[in-house]
Amino acid sequence: MTDTLIVLLSADGRAVLAWSAFDHAGQVVAHDGSGIAPAPASRRTIAIAPGTDVLSRRIDVPRGSGARARAALAYVLEDDLAGPVETVHVARGPTDASGQAVAAAVSRATLARWLETLTAAALVADAVVPDFVVPAAGSEPVAVSIGGRVVVALPDGTGFAAEDSWIDHVLPAAESGQPVRPAVMDAREFLNLAWARVRERAAPNLLQGEFAPASSAWLDGVAWRRTAVLAASLAVLFVVQQSVSAFQDRRAAAAAYAEAEAAARTALPADARLVNARAQIKARREALAARADDAFLAVSEALAAALAGSPGLSIDSLRFDAGRGAVTAVVAAADYAALDALKARLGQDGLAVEDGEARQAGATVLGEFSLSRR
């Protein structure tokens, strides 16, 4: 399984234009410039949608959260919207120190169509972001020509996109007064640039509110400072994993009911007397689940405490192996010394720590640890 799959949708959003699969360090492990070849399984999938259908503005973030706050965002943007507020879906990016954020608005029907396009390609997105967030604008606007459209990133974090035929009418001017000329990129170059940008988590993920996925993969890499927040996040991850596992187990059991007795003899301890296969397997699973839950909570509490006391570290990914009672964590740090210090702290907190792969990823070092109770 690859780490991140980034999918570029076509200018009309009705087809996959191209995709690239990346490892933890941002190296391309697979690429398809036609969008036809099946994409590999990945830990998370991010879709780059046509910004021609997305309005973005920098706004003062309304108080509150959830549906009411999103509804308030829609009315803040009402004067700029092409359709009635009720037909528009609004999402926003992270709030900055000034209390502002980039808000993005798109027709609900359009966003639903993009998700249908991904479903038709056997893909489920953890995030959908507009294409104009990919170029990184500094003090000057940046423009890129890609896939029949020009995407423009503005210094305030907003942007827009337009068809190539509108290029002379929409390009902003630089400080020199001359129009910004777009750099021409192919899909592979654009997706490479996209990987670097999505790692920053500065873009508004359109999959919020009613469109939010069950997966929390878009949140990977956020530095968790507070122990309580980290512990809660780990618990949610564990519950999601167990729910998926339970669903898969039920589906498999229904499909293989005729072989239940043979399966039971495999699943139960060797000395167990087989009386009621279904009841015995259920009891066995509940016992294993209780043991796994206890192991997970013990390891997550120790991990949470260690990270809370280690500023500058962040979780890149997590996996839980219920069979082993072990959590595999990939941690991002400034250097190898910080990873060594974390390992020592985890050992002091009563965990058995096994080193995995450690590698340089740009200015960051990623270290993998397998953690279990002693």
Image (spheres, rainbow, N blue to C red):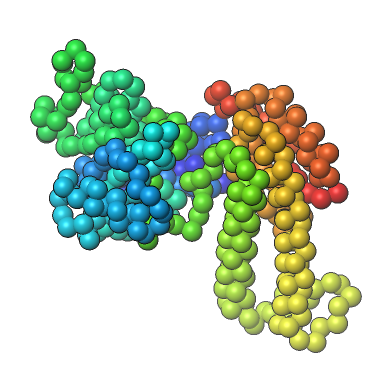
Q: Residue at x 80, y 87 (%)?
A: 275
Examine the rendered structure and indicate whether residue 242 appears above or below residue 17: below
Examine the rendered structure and indicate whether residue 137 appears above or below residue 164: above
Residue 81 visible: yes
Q: Residue at x 78, y 39 (%)?
A: 346
Residue 191 visible: no
Q: Position of residue 283 (x, y in %)?
A: 75, 77
Q: Position of residue 121 (x, y in %)?
A: 37, 54
Q: Residue at x 60, y 48 (%)?
A: 229
Q: Spot the residue most to the front.
A: 63
Q: Spot the residue most to the top.
A: 176
Closer to the camera, 62 or 107? 62
Q: Spot the residue most to the bottom.
A: 275
In the figure, is residue 94 to the left or right of 253? Answer: left
In the figure, is residue 338 to the left or right of 91? Answer: right
Q: Position of residue 342 (x, y in %)?
A: 73, 33
Closer to the camera, 192 or 84? 84
Quadrant in the rendering for residue 253: bottom right
Quadrant in the rendering for residue 68: bottom left
Closer to the camera, 151 or 177? 177
Q: Residue at x 29, y 45 (%)?
A: 104
Q: Position of residue 189 (x, y in %)?
A: 37, 29
